[in-house]
Image: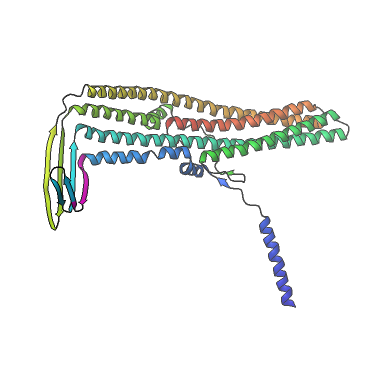
């Protein structure tokens, strides 16, 4: 009996524990900025498309290198068979034809070295370097987009907190107006105004929540993966500090490291090699070929086999006239190289201007944070004074309402200023071409 009782209680406790475990809500997923960047590098479709360009460029570079030293090789073979029979020749009669088979194979090597072959190696290397810089630029662009969207989510979640505090203040104001009306020191108009204001604050909170959820969806779209069904908690925080960078050093770093600028420079180097390749068509070329093979002939019962000895040919070819086609190709290559030189110069000016503008924007954003912090403190003190005056009957409801709305605006403006500062850093990082923190 006692054993059954013990087993029964154990079963009940197990069921209670299982039910409690089943009802425990799953923890909200967390996401750090480093994790977001890693996910984006692995899954963003646009970036992966650009990343795919490296493999063909790498093989073109290897092929150009191999053509300098390695000949081409061909292996060919054939087999022919004809059965026995009779063949009629007009005017001569019919003659018997014996069975006949013939098989052969040959191995052939060809090698040609010219100025274009040499220039093509430099051209392929420059194209590979340009592809690498395109990939680096795409990565910087992707990371900037992810950082900016991560900050946008952080701001949206902070604005949810602002809206929640606004609703709490509105509820406090409503309760105070209702209490004063109950004791005969307030009016029903004040109560109704406070009630409407509380409803508006609740709507603002609802919209802020919805905006936060939408921004999370946008982030995961940038990452290239499906968003989780639960709300995401961001783990990174971003302090506001005095910008520690100097504008001149940032400009110098951008002119050296900006991926878009480096890509254009690589394209210019590629075009320069294109000019050399076009000019090399006026130079002589060296060619070499070698052949080796065997053959077998069978007729009736006789079989004849032979081996073709090595056949080596070495020569030099000098192009004399091609109808001015080479001159036209040189002119086109020079025009392309000149265009890219001007594009590089224009991009250098653009990078310099972008860095200077982004740096000035960052300094202004930092100062705006300080000003908004002062406004936030002042509005909070004004709200406290207005609330105390209304509580003791020396102030009006409208005075307190204006003070509360001003406090809400100051909180929202301060939050916006903080994240505008962080977005300014992201903009500066994109202009420079590397992370700054």
For image coordinates 51% across by 28% down, the residue present is: 362
Q: Image quarter for residue 2?
A: bottom right
Residue 83 within the segment the image draws in magenta: yes
Magenta segment range?
68-85
Residue 93 appears in view: yes
Taking the image as shown, residue 309 lies to the left or right of residue 354, namely: left
For image coordinates 49% across by 44% down, the residue present is: 39
Taking the image as shown, residue 81 lies to the left or right of residue 224, namely: left
| Vertical position of residue 377 compared to residue 108: above or below | above
Quadrant occupied by the N terminus: bottom right
Residue 56 within the segment the image draws in magenta: no
| Vertical position of residue 422 compared to residue 32: above or below | above
Q: Residue furthest right?
A: 184
| Foreground residue among 148 and 58 | 58
Residue 354 picture location, percent across and down: 45, 25
Taking the image as shown, residue 331 lies to the left or right of residue 393, namely: left
Residue 237 appears in view: no
| Foreground residue among 115 and 323 | 323
Q: Main secondary structure of the magenta part?
A: strand
Q: Residue furthest bottom?
A: 1
Q: Image quarter for residue 433?
A: top left
Residue 369 picture location, percent across and down: 57, 29
Residue 54 picture location, percent across and down: 37, 39
Q: Image quarter for residue 140?
A: top left
Residue 190 picture location, percent across and down: 82, 29
């Amino acid at each position: 009996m006692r054993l059954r009782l013990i087993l029964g209680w154990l079963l009940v406790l197990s069921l209670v524990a299982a039910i409690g475990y089943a009802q425990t809500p799953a923890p909200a997923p967390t996401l750090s900025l480093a994790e977001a960047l890693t996910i984006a590098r692995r899954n963003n479709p646009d970036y992966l498309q650009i990343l795919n360009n490296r493999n063909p460029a790498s093989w073109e570079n290897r092929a150009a290198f191999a053509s300098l030293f390695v000949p081409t090789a061909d292996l060919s073979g054939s087999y022919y068979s004809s059965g026995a029979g009779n063949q009629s020749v007009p005017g001569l009669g019919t003659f018997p034809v014996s069975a006949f088979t013939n098989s052969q194979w040959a191995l052939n090597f060809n090698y040609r070295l010219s100025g274009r072959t040499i220039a093509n190696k430099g051209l392929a290397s420059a194209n590979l370097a340009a592809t690498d810089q395109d990939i680096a630029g795409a990565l910087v662009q992707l990371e900037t987009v992810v950082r900016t969207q991560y900050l946008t989510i952080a701001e949206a979640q902070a604005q949810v907190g602002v809206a929640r505090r606004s609703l709490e203040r509105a509820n406090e104001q409503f309760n105070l107006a209702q209490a004063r009306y109950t004791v005969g020191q307030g009016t029903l108009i004040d109560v109704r105004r406070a009630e409407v204001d509380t409803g508006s604050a609740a709507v603002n909170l609802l919209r802020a929540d919805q905006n936060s959820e939408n921004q999370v969806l946008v982030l995961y779209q940038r990452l290239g993966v499906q968003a989780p069904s639960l709300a995401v908690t961001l783990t990174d925080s971003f302090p506001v500090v005095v910008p520690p960078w100097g504008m001149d050093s940032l400009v110098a770093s951008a002119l050296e490291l900006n991926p878009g600028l480096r890509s254009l420079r690589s394209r210019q180097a590629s075009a320069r090699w294109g000019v050399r390749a076009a000019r090399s068509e006026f130079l002589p070329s060296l060619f070499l070929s070698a052949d080796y093979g065997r053959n077998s002939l069978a007729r009736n019962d006789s079989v004849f086999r032979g081996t073709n000895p090595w056949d080596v040919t070495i020569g030099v070819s000098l192009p004399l006239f091609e109808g001015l086609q080479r001159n036209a190709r040189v002119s086109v290559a020079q025009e392309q190289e000149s265009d890219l030189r001007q594009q590089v110069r224009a991009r250098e000016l653009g990078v310099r201007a972008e860095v200077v503008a982004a740096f000035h924007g960052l300094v202004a954003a930092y100062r705006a944070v300080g000003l908004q912090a002062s406004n936030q403190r002042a509005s909070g003190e004004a709200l406290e004074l207005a609330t105390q005056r209304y509580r003791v009957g020396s102030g009006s409801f409208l005075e307190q309402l204006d003070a509360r709305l001003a406090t809400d605006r100051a909180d929202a403006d301060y939050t916006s200023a903080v994240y505008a500062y962080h977005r300014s850093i992201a903009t500066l990082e994109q202009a420079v071409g590397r992370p700054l923190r």
